[in-house]
Image: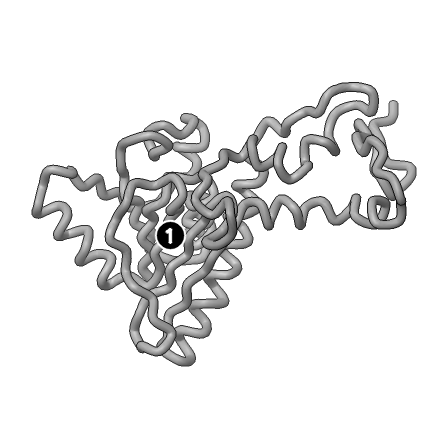
Amino acid sequence: IIVVELGARVGVGVCGSLLRQLGATVVLVERSGPGSDENRKALNRRQLSADKLSFAPRPDSTADLEMLQRLLACCDVALTSSDIDPPLSLPTVDPRERGTPVLCDITAFGASGPLAKVGYSDLQVQAFSGIVDTTGLVDGPPVPIGVPIVEFMTGTYAAGATLAALRVKRLSGVGQAIDMALYDCAFASLSTFMSGILNKKTLSKSRVGNRHPTVAPWNIFK
């Protein structure tokens, strides 16, 4: 299984890393520009590049760009993040045509809707989805999670979806287009709080510090 990792989002790197650990050959396409691989935090960059092949096409090289297109033409999976990546000619996925690859696009809000092209960061999605309202002490301000937790969750979901799509392709020969949104995964992570919210007529502060909203005892104890 050949995977071409094009997207600059951490979630794309997580998905590619999981597929590599499961045995796929992953080619990391290095690109420059805002939000690109070289601008990732150093720790994430080194962690998410481990054991992958690297290809850094020069934008002014016709030969490099042709090689990239040949790579995309023969790959089984292409991973991208179209809301923050520079435009690139990606393989077309047609469910009626056999032999097309699996194309997984990880974005902040998905391919449709009013925020489809808004390239929110992990921290912005934490705030927009309400995750930061569940962290921190009850009487204190919202506290963001220090690691890109939503990107990591989304990358994990994307890897599972890619495996399912590869199974379909193996059985039918048809590729799949996977639309994976950070916001959807962030919302799913709030399921612990949903029962309380849906059973109350008014929404009170939901920050619980070290405690758990529905389970006791759950805290840090000496």
User: Which kind of residue does numbered mark 1 sit on?
Assistant: Leu
Above or below 176: residue 179:
above
| Image location of residue 27, percent across then percent down | 29, 49
Q: How many labels does the image show?
A: 1
Q: Which residue is rendered at x = 27% and y = 37% of the image?
A: 31
**Quarter of the figure that contains the C terminus:** top right
Q: Considering the numbered disc 1 on the image, is that residue within a helix, a strand or a loop?
A: strand
104 or 25: which is nearer to us?
Answer: 104
Residue 143 position by quadrant? top right
Q: Residue furthest bottom?
A: 172
Q: Residue furthest right?
A: 216
**Quarter of the figure that contains the N terminus:** bottom left
Q: Which residue is rendered at x = 37% and y = 52% of the image?
A: 79
Above or below 101: residue 88:
above
Residue that label 1 marks: 79
| Image location of residue 2, percent across then percent down | 31, 59
Mark 1: few/some/many CA within 10 Å (<14, 14-19, 20+):
many
| Image location of residue 41, percent across then percent down | 43, 27
| Left or right of residue 34: residue 117 | right
Residue 8 position by quadrant? top left
Q: Which residue is rendered at x = 29% and y = 64% of the image?
A: 92
